[in-house]
Amino acid sequence: MFNKVLIANRGEIAVRIIRACRELGLQTVAVYSENDRQALHVRYADEAYNIGAAPSRDSYLRADKIIECAKKSEAGAIHPGYGFLAERADFAQACLDEGIIFIGPNPSSILSMGDKTVARKTVSKAGVPVVPGTEGEGCLRDEEIMNEAERIGFPLLIKASAGGGGKGMREVNSIEEMPLLLKSARREAEAAFGDGNVYLEKVLEDARHIEFQIIADTHGNIIHLGERECSLQRRHQKMLEETPSPFIDDDPEIRQEMGSVAVKAAQAVGYVNAGTIEFLVDKDKNYYFLEMNTRLQVEHPITEMVTGVDIVKEQIRVARGRQLRYNQEDISQKGWSMECRINAEDPYNNFNPSTGTITHILSPTGPGVRVDTGIYPGFEVSPYYDSLISKLVVWGETRAEAILRMRRALEEYRIIGVRTNIPFYQRLMDSHRFMGAQYDTRFIEERFSLESAEEGLPDRAPIAAVMSTLVAHRQTQLSAQIIQRNERDTSNWKWIGRWERMQR
Ligand code: MV4
């Protein structure tokens, strides 16, 4: 069994994985590009290898060089993190062929979930609801697509079969718009994935984007770790994630149901290791499978904060052939967590990437705050990789406490040398709609921007008043629901206790 892990990634996620290895007593091997010689993941690892020039295709995407480093360093396993090679079935297969353990799912799971038409067909056969749209897998000719479009109705979405995350996606409002948008969607998909195949889905309006974390071992055990609310996106980049989802927080039954559906979807492809099932949920709480991400996700820490499960350590354990350390009954969500993705970009200038040397950092700490980062003072943020420089994660007993902590942490945070999107998040924390959890997938792009927010420093008093009203209202709502739901099966003592709390 392996006792050395090569981390085929960079930045905060590479650091995160190295930390998990350390705690498990495993040796670590970093790989780095020319540009990342001074990066934090290189400093934290036990050994490190230069794998090429700065552009990803010359370094972090070079499967051959990475496997060579694993062999040279006698690393028995490779953790791919997210992005780069994480969802490349051929890379997972190449590891297997070389006798190296790929800390992730089987190549076949990656393949069947990677093609969205195959994924839709596979999970729907297993009884998982999918968004109404084209059925079957494989290529659809323009003519078939036009016929299907009429059947599905408008508005609809053209999506890339090889896509995910919104690339190659087009919204179509009438049959007249179809030919042109179909052409451009195919062209974009071909350029991005080398695969111009597309499929159609009906547009779900006013939907929320809610995903379930699952993890499976090689002994047939599989559990879910609850949901994450991911509706706050900008140009298909998630901006803020929270768990529980405020939208299903008061409804443990739907959580349980969606959780077991997520497990079913993963089982349909014989899934092992950690993965995420994405759902769209409409305002009547109908939910539909969207896609599965066959990797560790950026936003995994918020699930760790409320469940207490160290997802990365669990990934490594199951890759070693161990049984999951938890049953479904062991998993519960305590409190509330949210994450802001701190990017080196200018929120006042169309979120353009901002590069340069970080001269000073003052990181927030204290109760309920976790910062996962790959930077330090003196590090140069380059244009070669994505602009995520840190993830600011908070935990609170309630959503209100989490928001107040996030506000406090954002205020403490100082990053000098590059521009960051921290001001954007400060405004978001002050947004009444966000506080009241009145948002869906269109909120950021249609209703929220720095420009439209009032200028000047926010006045604390009205915000505090709104917050406390919301918290009080929410708590009354919740206790009323608890009492209704549990009348049947709760002891009188508990019932009275809850009643008394509600009366306060
Ligand atoms: C959708 C949708 C509504 N209806 N599919 C898929 C990839 C993700 N990044 C966006 N996706 C969506 N797929 C159907 N059938 C809504 C989204 C969506 C979204 C769309 C536009 C703007 C922001 C969005 C945020 C989350 C989800």
Image (spheres, rainbow, N blue to C red):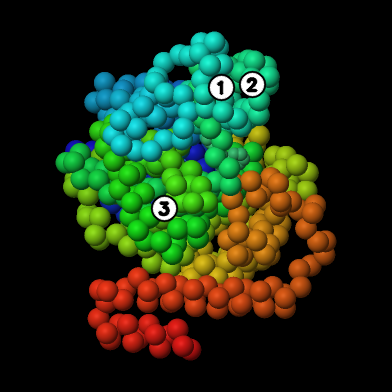
Q: Name the residue under label 1.
A: 150
Query: Would you say the beta carbon of the disc 3 residue lies within 8 angstroms of ligand 1?
Result: no
Name the amino acid, label 3: Glu
Q: Residue furthest left?
A: 219
- Mark 1 Cα shell of 10 Å, populated few (<14), some (14-19), many (≥20): few
Residue 312 makes an appearance in the image: no
Q: Which residue is drawn at 41% across and 16% down?
A: 138
Q: Nearer the viewer, residue 123 or 13?
A: 123
Q: Residue at x 42, y 23 (%)?
A: 135
Is there a contact, CB below 8 Å, between mark 1 and mark 3?
no
- Mark 2 Cα shell of 10 Å, populated few (<14), some (14-19), many (≥20): some
| Residue 299, disc | none
SS assignment at label 1: helix
Mark 1 vs mark 3: give the one in front: 1
Q: In which quarter of the image is residue 253?
A: bottom left
Q: Quadrant of ligand 1?
A: top right
Q: Mark 2 points at which residue?
A: 175
Q: In which quarter of the image is residue 45?
A: top left
Q: Looking at the picture, does residue 139 appear above or below residue 80?
A: above
Residue 132 makes an appearance in the image: yes
- Mark 3 Cα shell of 10 Å, populated few (<14), some (14-19), many (≥20): many
Q: Where is residue 196 in the image (x, y as percent from the top left)?
A: 53, 15
Q: Name the residue under label 3.
A: 227
Name the amino acid, label 2: Ile
Spatial CA distance of label 2 from label 1 is: 7 Å
Name the amino acid, label 1: Glu
- Which mark is first along the chain, 3 or 1? 1
